[in-house]
Image (cartoon, rainbow, N blue to C red):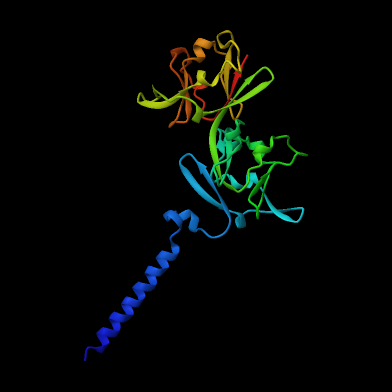
Amino acid sequence: MHSAPRTASRVLLAALAILFVALLAGCSKDDDPVAALPGGFLMVYHEGDSSAVFFADLPSFDVEGLDAILLDAFVDTFLVPPYYDRDQAMYDSRPLYAYRIEGEDGFSASVKGYPDNAWEHLELGYLLVAARQVVFPDDVIDLPGAYNVKDAARVIVLRKFDVVYADTTAVREIADLSVVQVENHDGALEDAVRLSDLVETTIVPDPSTMQYNIVALDGYGPSTPMSWAEFGTGYWLLDSKRTIFTDPDLSTGAYELRVLEQILVQ
């Protein structure tokens, strides 16, 4: 008389047990869901977001019988969208960033004191898939061996600016600068970095005697250079992602750049 309900209960318990086993199988070491993803991949980190970029989804080519993938394939325009100017002309914004390639053990070229990779480096280097070995071939680019990271695990995308002085271009990353607060274009306090902090005396021996200009990715910028005192009133707003100058004479749109790329020192 009670056999049907008992049978139903056994079926329900069995189904729950199968579901529990499946959930356990889906868990990874240290409960890290990324580690449970199938296949080879690199993690790419950009402005608080992360993506697992799978080798199988990218075009590969042969290097002495081994599968390889160009490094620039790991950072697509979905992750770092292009910039469109007021005329809807498109500019690849990936050159605005530096790229730190880290191994499983956290090693990168920056550990040895070298700057992070520029975008043009990623267009020339590749990853050997099976070994997860980063290679920058000596016959196409002259980089120290520290950039050839072993057991590559992740790519960290970092906003940077280029300081151009004489025949030298120095790369400065926002992450290396002190954060201050400044009143933004809406009159609210916002985290920012000082543009003057980009100019180190190791780059420009006597900054106070020089003139400065700012140039965006599309080549746009003020037509008149600034003195050191004027330049010292400039900031990069971290949330608004644009420049602002507190000097009232520099409050026009020409000094509000959204895709700042270069600081020119003259």
- Residue 261 position, x and y percent, is 58, 28
Query: Which of these two is toward me, 67 or 187?
Result: 67
In the picture as drawn, the residue positioned furthest to the bottom comes out as 1
The residue that appears at 69% across and 52% down in the rendered structure is 68
Quadrant housing the N terminus: bottom left
Quarter of the image with the C terminus in it: top right
The relative height of residue 117 versus residue 178 in the rendered view (above or below) is: below
Quadrant of the rendered image containing residue 168:
top right
Residue 65 percent coordinates (x, y): 75, 56
Where does residue 257 sit, x and y in percent of width and height?
52, 26
Q: Residue 115 at x, y = what percent?
A: 61, 31
Q: Quadrant of residue 237?
A: top left
Q: Is residue 224 visible?
A: no
Residue at image position (57%, 12%) is 207
Question: Relative to 176, is 89 above or below?
Answer: below
In-image side of 60 versus 23 (left or right): right
Q: Return the residue nearer the eye: 174 or 10.
A: 10
Residue 82, placed above or below residue 37 = above
